Image: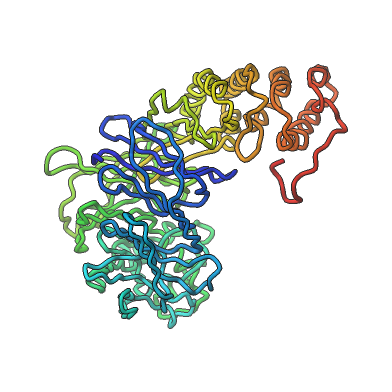
Amino acid sequence: MLNTQNLHTHRLFYGGGFNQVQVHDNSQLATEVLSQFELTGSEHDVVWRSWLGDDRIVALDERGNLYIWPFQSGVKVAVAPLLKLGLMPFKDVSLQGSTLWLMARRQGERFSEVRLFRIDLDSLQVTEYPPCEFDFVGGSMVALESGDFVFYQHSGKPGYKFRTHGLVRYAPQSGQTTPVSLTGKPAPETISVRETFFFHQRHGLALTANAESLRAVQSADGQTAYQFELQLIDFHRQQVRWSRPVRTLLPNQIADEYDCDELVEALDAIAGGDHSASHNDALQSFIECLTCVYLSDDGEQIWLAWQDGYVQCLSSQGELLSPLYQLQRVAPNGERASLSHWHDQLTILDVKNEGQEPANSILTLAIGDPEWATLWQVVLPTAAPVPLCEAAESKPVLCQRTHFDLQLPAPLMGTPMTSGQVDIPCGDLEEQGDRLASLERLNALMPAWQTYFERNIQAGHLFFAFVATQPGGDKVQSEKHFFPAVAAGSDEGRELLAELIEQFTRWPCASRLMGQAGAPVLADAVLSLIDRVEYLPVLARYFCAIGQQESALRYHLNRTLPAIREIHAGTSELTAFNQQLPPPWNNLDHTVVSTCDYDDEY
């Protein structure tokens, strides 16, 4: 295993896709996929993956399915689990040498009975410890040299006096637990998709807001602004290493204009000593303005990202290493504008150094919710201690849109996984140009897949996953999301979809193939074209080519064909379309009952 070979995992979240583990080679400008492995039976998130020595890979999903397999370049193979622990819920994991430690609960046990599991990855021997007598925040496990573990915990009660946090040290051999109180108070727990606890297991550090440190301050122009202290928690020392204010925010940097009055009232009350739980939402909104904390590989630099499009660097000792950078982009009118359109989530995915010492920092950023976030890069000057007078002044910097090219060698592209999944690289899933390029590549590979399925008569499934690789984790879209987006984007996209369907209609083996989760092959491509009358002839040829398995009948008879007949009712094109269909597609009275009342797919 070279330091340029990285493990990436993705899974289609709709339709029961299995987890895919790819080995990427990042030594060149474009990332090359060396191998792909399908984790058979793994339909839940992979919570941990790693190299095991130089030639083996180990992965664990949240249900406790453990996979260990030898690395081989240039293959696409399925991997079966070596252990099925039956865990739910899974809470934490830590690898120490060839020993894997888990904190989880076995299915069927009481919810509170979370216990420690020790797995020897060489012998696959599993040791279970008695249920733990303490609760903790999942994803906060740190192993100490003594063999003990440290976890972060906090009270979930909303009242101010109950909101406490701390660490708990656990000795597996004796079962002894030692709680350690921490100064400050954690953020109140509310329903939110944003993180407020930023944990870094490798260095045993966490950063979180001290929610009792909120202060109202007067800015230079007389406006009231607000600040809180950021705490660095050291798990190895079991203490708060430092706590300091990092930024002052105006109300319009925290909330929308219509919510500012209510926000100011609540924050002023908190700053004045009123800690009523009725102000928790405003406090949470304020704390969540800090959307990301990124720790460098050496643990010496801490990059902070804020929802209004600002970033700043601190040292591990809490010193300012950079001014406050205002991230900007070039707007469609040619002028500069904030990278953050509307208090968007800003995430730092990667930080690299460029050039000789002192080196510039290249930040790779994602702006927006993870489902539709766009990628950007910015080059920032060398980080060095910054005088306080300069730290208060923000400096605008221009970001550039970016994506990461992912290359799959032809032998890998021409072979589906055992489940039938084929990954199609896409530079940026939000850019129509990149989507069209992926669809052109898909069309070019159809003859290779036809040959594969004609030679492998036991293979009965084919479906596509569109993958955009990025440092923080690959993004993937199913046909259900990708094909409609392509069709809505341009006439060229619709033509490429029609070409794709046309090629499939000429496959002699088309009638025996099914798509993802029992849906017909290319069902969403067909649905994406049903509103255009010029595509009815190719859709008719599609229905003549595909099989009539029950799930295919259920999908198209209950969804596709009724929509076509409603959209094109009374037209000569619909009459011609119906005349070309074989039974039962041309039988208006033929129906197949849906599998359940809540089945909106078929």
Position above or below: 334 against 532: below
Position above or below: 192 against 495: below
> How is colour applied across the structure in the image?
rainbow
Side of 398 relative to 252 (left or right): left
Identify the residue at image location x=83%, y=37%. Answer: 591
Q: Is residue 338 visible?
A: no
Q: Decide which of 409, 465 is in the foreground and name it.
A: 409
Side of 582 relative to 501 (left or right): right
Q: Quadrant of the N terminus?
A: top left
Q: Residue furthest left?
A: 357
Question: Residue 313 at what x, y percent from top left?
Answer: 25, 54
Badge count: 0
Position above or below: 90 against 16: below
Identify the residue at image location x=27%, y=55%. Answer: 295
Question: Residue 362 at what x, y percent from top left?
Answer: 26, 41
Rendered image quadrant of residue 224 = bottom left
Q: Decide which of 531, 579 is in the foreground and name it.
A: 579
Q: Quadrant of the C terminus?
A: top right
Question: Residue 417 at what x, y percent from top left?
Answer: 49, 34
Q: Is residue 81 visible?
A: yes
Q: Residue furthest right?
A: 589
Q: Decide which of 500, 301 is in the foreground and name it.
A: 500
Rendered image quadrant of residue 301 = bottom left
Question: Residue 61 at what x, y percent from top left?
Answer: 45, 53
